[in-house]
Image (spheres, coloured by chain):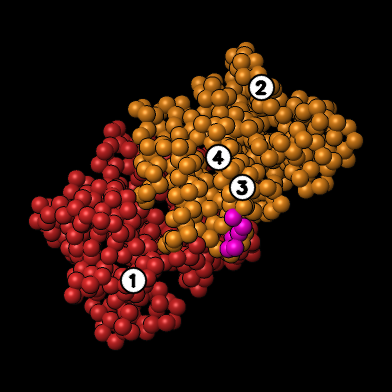
Chain colours: A orange, B red
Amino acid sequence: MTGGGEFGFIRTRLLPLTRGHRAALDLSDDAALLDPAPGCQIVVASDMLVAGVHFLETDPPEIAAERAVRSNLSDLAAMGAQPLGYLSSIAWPTGIEASWRDGFIAGLAAAQDTFGLSLLGGDTTSGPSPLTISLTMLGQVPAGTALLRRGARPDDDVWVSGTIGDAWLGLAIARGDVAHNSVLLERYRRPIPRLELGISLRGLASACLDISDGLVADAGHIAEVSGVRLELQADQIPFSPPARIWLASAPSDGLVRLVTGGDDYELLFCAPSARRALISGLGEHFDLTLTRIGTVTEGQGGALIGPNGVVLETGAGGFTHF
Amino acid sequence: MTGGGEFGFIRTRLLPLTRGHRAALDLSDDAALLDPAPGCQIVVASDMLVAGVHFLETDPPEIAAERAVRSNLSDLAAMGAQPLGYLSSIAWPTGIEASWRDGFIAGLAAAQDTFGLSLLGGDTTSGPSPLTISLTMLGQVPAGTALLRRGARPDDDVWVSGTIGDAWLGLAIARGDVAHNSVLLERYRRPIPRLELGISLRGLASACLDISDGLVADAGHIAEVSGVRLELQADQIPFSPPARIWLASAPSDGLVRLVTGGDDYELLFCAPSARRALISGLGEHFDLTLTRIGTVTEGQGGALIGPNGVVLETGAGGFTHF
């Protein structure tokens, strides 16, 4: 069920986002039509973002769009997949301003340019607020090489890319709860899907995911489906310089907040210790910090271990909104 | 960003819907992992449905779910694709009753059973009302055989499956505007995606779509992307017995309402006249009425032609909510 206004919007605003990609069929049909590479599996991730829940209602529209594309791409990075394109379904709030919609489209375009991505299809509609965005990201991976959460084995190393907690601090800045810092704010606004790293970890990592619920909660997810325990050493967790500055004067639970805050979109992965040199080499190749933060053991759960070997209390261990 | 309640819901309610399909990875990973058949293209359709816009807030939850799956399947039918499975992203209204959610899951399960379908992944979240559902349906089609909207040529016949206007009358019944009739109500509540017909029309139809905006508006869509005109003969349009009874005592614009009402999810397709016998044979094979309702001509637009050859006024010619 669509109407004249929608067709005009598709033609003038969405069609350019296809960048002429064949699979989009000029957005004139009911679906996209993709040619998978021979010998590849198709990877499909769908994410739904609701204004006020997954991004702030005060976030600029460009940022809402960038976060949607980038977090969805991060799901592909976690599987070691190469992106093929995406479909976007959007429910605009009734009476939304044209400038807001244009800003949102500009954000999609900016994210597409960064990652060489094309819009392949989707749906637009409108209804009572709030803005709701559902993106479906498609990618491919040579058959049998996808990174999954289920392969961690006792004695594997636990690794993490980049730094932890920056996006949580960035969100606090966007909310006005923490003093402005443009580096941290950017980490919230434009998370970086670790696509190249994910692709390079095929055959190296035994388990992998992207951190969205928080480092400790997501370690628990790998632990659960792999049937093991992940022990993370608190003093090994990598923090950025501005996060370290914040920690220095933070309340006593500052560290726990950073490792449970979520939305890092860094890769958390496990790998046999024999691969340490290879993985460190990858970090140097991509100029991306890869840090060994713990060990896989027999048992269950994801645990944060303090300086004296004591398990630190992290509460529910992840963002809960459900 | 997910929380404890969501994980329990995924485990107890959504995991059974995967019916053990390998591509779903037990819903433990960030994406589904599909094996396309060799030589096939992947067909991907995303639809977003908002409570109060695409279904009635008073519709039972089972019906909201059935309509979502069936209308999304209809997009695949229109392309001649065979379904592979689907991803569901759902934003539940904050404080939604557990019984409503269970009813919705039961509706997904019922639709899956009917069409032999598995849930492959997705996302669940919650937020301010209304309920918003985004389904992504995946299918496959032998490379180069997908039905598109763009191939209609002058002198092609225009065909339609089933009967037109029943779902519009069914919606009017659900709203209490028209006297109860269980056949019509069912046509609104559980539209039938014409999957077998779509697959059989590969190589026969020159253009095809599923009617969601209304017969005349959708004829206009084929006309636009094919660069032709579709002339539909009003007296050839197939109506069901209860729709004919309603028409007999309807206002003078009754016929126009039926052909512009939308949500029929019947296939509207064009084909060279040399294929008439083959297409009629398909209808007999599937025990499904296939009716020749018009002709493709030079020109543009979709037109409804009255008994004296006069073009009938159909207004905007489709449902508009945007």
Q: Amino acid at mark 1?
A: Thr
Query: Where residue A247 appears, x then y in whole percent?
Result: 85, 34
Residue picked out by circle 3? A103
Q: Amino acid at mark 3?
A: Gly
Mark 4–mark 1 Cα distance, whole angstroms, equals 37 Å
Q: Amino acid at mark 2?
A: Leu
Q: Quadrant of residue A75?
A: top right
Q: Secondary structure at mark 1?
A: loop
| Tag shown at residue A109 | 4
Query: Where residue B30 appears, x then y in whole percent?
Result: 54, 39
**Horizontal side, residue A42 vs residue A274: left or right:** left
Q: Up-down: is A204 above or below B307?
A: above
Residue picked out by circle 2? A288
Query: Where residue B217 appears, x then y in whole percent?
Result: 34, 63
Nearest to viewer (mark 4 / mark 1) = 1
Instruction: State the extent of the magenta-drawn residues as a range.
Output: A93-98
Mark 1–mark 2 Cα distance, whole angstroms, equals 61 Å
**Horizontal side, residue A35 vs residue A163: left or right:** left
